[in-house]
Image: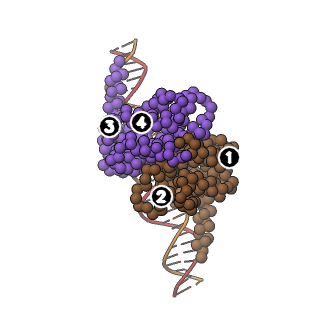
Chain colours: A purple, B brown, C red, D orange
Amino acid sequence: MSDDWRERKKARTRRAIQEAALRLFLDKGYEETTVAQIAQAAGVSHMTFFRYFPTKEDVVIEDEYDPMIEELIRSRPADEPPAARVRHAVTQELALIGAADREVVLTRLRLMLSTPALRARLWENQYRTQRLLERALSGEDDPAPVPLRTRVIASACLAALVTALTTWAESDGADDLPALVDEAFAVLRGEFD
Amino acid sequence: MSDDWRERKKARTRRAIQEAALRLFLDKGYEETTVAQIAQAAGVSHMTFFRYFPTKEDVVIEDEYDPMIEELIRSRPADEPPAARVRHAVTQELALIGAADREVVLTRLRLMLSTPALRARLWENQYRTQRLLERALSGEDDPAPVPLRTRVIASACLAALVTALTTWAESDGADDLPALVDEAFAVLRGEFD
DNA sequence: AATAACGTGTTACTCCCTAACATCAGGGGG
DNA sequence: CCCCCTGATGTTAGGGAGTAACACGTTATT
């Protein structure tokens, strides 16, 4: 019953840590900020920090969009070409996210791209996302190894998407993200014939 | 004059450290091996280790093939389609490397793919390689920002290459690497039309 | 009211990595 | 032959990330 209370308190603490961390990162830089400082700014001990985020990097990384895109891909008609399924799923996801988290996403993205340690973790996430794309494009419970064709398609689509995201972040959000994504996928279609 | 001696001695020490490290990593696992143990096994102090390798990860990462591929791309005719330039350059590089370092490359690749910390650094390297591909595909000293088209092509080619490498490593080297690479680029050409 | 469960803090520890300083080898000029 | 200079190495001390063990207090259960 009062699990609700616990959950709410935990969510508050979590947000407090994350906000304090991002504020300090933007203020002094990622490497120059220590976990102890974040914990103190959030009013908790440095152990509590690690109970909420397994590593210092996770405060920034935290990718919550992967499950959504998997669902969107699976819900596309199976007779559609794989690349088109991914493209439509991504477009739908961008529409769903909309302008709501735009600023936060942009800030976190720039932080990640400009900090080596975070970049590394970002690519590690990309690896996870690729495996997810491969599984979504294959049958869902196919235990057979994913064929090379599917893997290459998944990796190329993801590469196009990431390139669009990177370009967007480097323009400080001046470009239109959905347009960039469309353009990137168009290059994929047009260039390899 | 005796710079030669110094250089040879340094090269020996470097190889000793790297060999001791790889041996220990394969024996006990990457995370379970400490830098101090590597240094001791190589007969040096733990400071000497860091003088040769900036981080523990670099002992495994150490990508010496990037400059070669850049040269190969630049030496392709400029009127060739970008993706073809990359494909031919990669094929030539594989021929140059040949079977010499095959075992070492395979071992290191498997180690990287199975160790989270190394995977992260691997993707970070992929990012650097992508920038390098983009520059090689553009004019060499073009200070203008690389157009999205070039970036997408570079990222897609690299994605195909890495997918082939990953598949090869996962097959424990049973597959034929050049064939896998050809196949991956063929998917790129065939799928996006 | 007693007790179990859970979040939290404290402390101490390991490991990666850096900085400052000492040491030791060999090479060149007197 | 000796002194000094240079560059590689070792020693020591320390900061910061992350982990483990245990104690404390508050909340839920009976």
Name the residue tied to disc 1: B176
Query: Residue flagged by tag 3: what amino acid is it?
Result: Ala
Callout 2 secondary element: loop
Marks 3 and 1 close (CB-CB < 8 Å): no
Q: Distance between the residues labelled 2 and 1?
A: 31 Å
Real-space Cα distance between discs 3 and 1? 47 Å
Percent x, y for residue D20?
Answer: 49, 36
Q: Who is closer to the viewer here, B86 or B62?
A: B86
The tag on residue A99 is 3
* Same chain assignment for discs 4 and 2: no
Q: Is residue A44 positioned above or below B165 on the image?
A: above
Closer to the eye: label 2 or 3 = 2
Residue drawn 39% across and 51% down? Answer: A114
Query: Mark 2 to mark 3: distance in Å?
Result: 34 Å
Distance of label 1 from label 4 (alpha carbons): 37 Å
**Quarter holding residue B2:** bottom right
- Residue A109 in percent (x, y) is at 38, 44
Q: Residues within 10 Å of mark 3 (few under 14, many from 20)?
A: few
Most foreground residue, B23 or C9: B23
- Residue A35 visible to an observer of this rendering: no
Residue A29 at what x, y percent from top left? 35, 50
Number of numbered labels in the structure image: 4
- Name the chain under label 3: A
- Name the residue located 61 percent from the left edge and 42 percent from the top edge: B167
| Marking on residue B138 | 2
Of callouts 2 and 1, the N-terminal one: 2
Instruction: Identify the element where label 1 is drawn.
Output: loop
